[in-house]
Amino acid sequence: MKISQAHSLSPTIAPLHTSSIREVLDTRKIIANTDSARQAPMISVEERAPQLGNLLIPRDAPRLLRFLDVEVPSVFTKPLTDDQMMAKWMKESISHPLRPTGKGVSNGYTQDDVDTIKAMTGYNFIAFDGGTTVVDDDGNPVPYEVSRMIMKIADRIETDRSLGLLVGDITESYLRGVFKDFEKNGRALPEEWLKRGLAYVRERDTYRPAAVRRSITA
């Protein structure tokens, strides 16, 4: 499934020989302010988190929020476009409360789960109501083999949470164990992913010990 700018003309700065230094600086300031005004404000996922209900997307993927502004027809007279389908899933998810995680709960993920997967792989794992997908920062699908490996990691995380084997945020030891298990079973994951994941977890625990996470644990 394919999930899918306008160029603006900037005012011309007057030549230096016809303007004073102050005039040139003032003109540049006006241009900068004008360009900023033309750009749509980028709302962070963290700022929108309280409004996202049971939709989980990585914190550093604010462009994915654009799908919430896509109109979805109430009556389907023709198949939905890829953007409309993504918008439909996202809008349905935000209308429900965040699903808890813990023993006996299926399809349960935390904000830390999707953030860790993004840090490891560079791609966005999105959890909807009863479904998941993997896309790049613009909402486009990723190569099948990459998506398959990411889904395997996500399935393992979800299974461990539902069995009560994973509680709270993902740890270094947990990541090492997951990658080791995949390797034992002949389905080794990219070593670079493990390195990135470990680096993310260390940085998270070192520099963001009090970070607010949308994490509900048993």
Image (tube, rainbow, N blue to C red):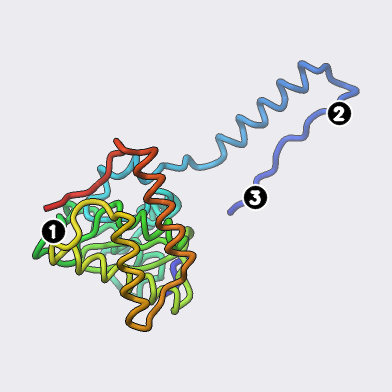
Q: Nearer the viewer, residue 51 or 208?
A: 208
**Percent x, y of residue 103:** 10, 62
Name the residue at 30% across, 57% down.
113
Left or right of 101: which side holds 213? right
Left or right of 27: which side holds 180? left
Calculate the distance from the C-alpha at mark 2 to the C-alpha at mark 3: 24 Å
Q: How many tags in the picture? A: 3
Find disc 2 in the rendering and name its residue.
Answer: 15
* Neighbour tally class for label 3: few under 14, some 14-19, many 20 plus, Cα within 10 Å: few
The amino acid marked with disc number 1 is: Gly
**Going from the N terminus, do you reach mark 3 or mark 1 first?**
3
- For the residue labelled by badge 2, is the local secondary structure a helix, a strand or a loop? loop
The amino acid marked with disc number 3 is: His
The amino acid marked with disc number 2 is: Pro
* Neighbour tally class for label 2: few under 14, some 14-19, many 20 plus, Cα within 10 Å: few
Name the residue at 34% across, 64% down.
176
Find disc 1 in the rendering and name its residue.
Answer: 102
Q: Nearer the viewer, residue 163 or 8?
A: 163
